[in-house]
Image (spheres, rainbow, N blue to C red):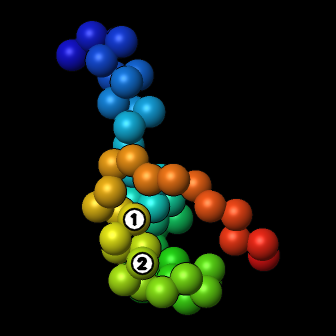
């Protein structure tokens, strides 16, 4: 795999999955910490492209 391909793959990597891996926590633990429903995080974890929304938190 070339450097360009690796860079493109990194850009497409799912942020929810990457966050869980980085923090070494499960989707359930992330849900508790963020106050976002676990199923919502799982759905986001399966979608490659989604629209960012302002949560007004």
Q: Contact (CB < 8 A) between labels 1 and 2?
A: yes
Inter-mark Cα distance, 1 to 2: 6 Å
Q: Relative to residue 44, is residue 52 drawn left or right?
A: right
- The residue at 36%/83% (across/down) is 39
User: Could you tell me residue 27's position as x and y percent?
Assistant: 40, 77
Q: Nearer the viewer, residue 53 or 4?
A: 53
At 36% from the left and 12% from the top, the residue drawn is 4
In this view of the protein, can residue 1 be seen by the observer?
yes
Residue 34 sits in which quadrant?
Answer: bottom right
Q: Nearer the viewer, residue 55 or 27?
A: 55
Q: Which residue is mark 2?
A: 40
Q: Which residue, as the protein is rendered here, is positioned at the far right? A: 57
Q: Residue furthest left?
A: 1
Horizontal and vertical percent for residue 45?
35, 63
User: Judging from the image, what secondary structure is the residue with disc 2 in?
Assistant: helix
- Compared with 54, 15 (above or below) is above
As helix, strand or loop, the secondary structure at mark 1 comes to: helix
Percent from the top left, x then y, of residue 37?
Answer: 48, 87
Q: What is the quadrant of residue 2 in the picture?
A: top left
- Quarter of the image where the C terminus is located: bottom right
In this picture, is 5 found above or below 34?
Answer: above
Quadrant (top left/top right/bottom left/bottom right) for the N terminus: top left
Q: Nearer the viewer, residue 22 or 14?
A: 14
- Quarter of the image where one finds residue 47: bottom left
Label 1, residues with CA under 10 Å away: few <14, some 14-19, many ≥20? some
- On the image, the x and y values in percent for residue 36 come to 55, 82
* Above or below for 27 versus 35: above
Q: Which mark is residue 15?
A: none
Q: Which residue is mark 1?
A: 44
Judge whether residue 21 can be spotted in this image: no
């Amino acid at each position: 795999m070339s450097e360009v391909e690796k860079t493109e793959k990194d850009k497409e990597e799912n942020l929810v999955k990457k966050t869980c891996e980085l923090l070494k926590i499960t989707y359930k633990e992330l849900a508790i910490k963020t106050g976002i429903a676990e199923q919502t995080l799982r759905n986001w974890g399966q979608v490659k492209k989604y629209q960012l929304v302002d949560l007004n938190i």
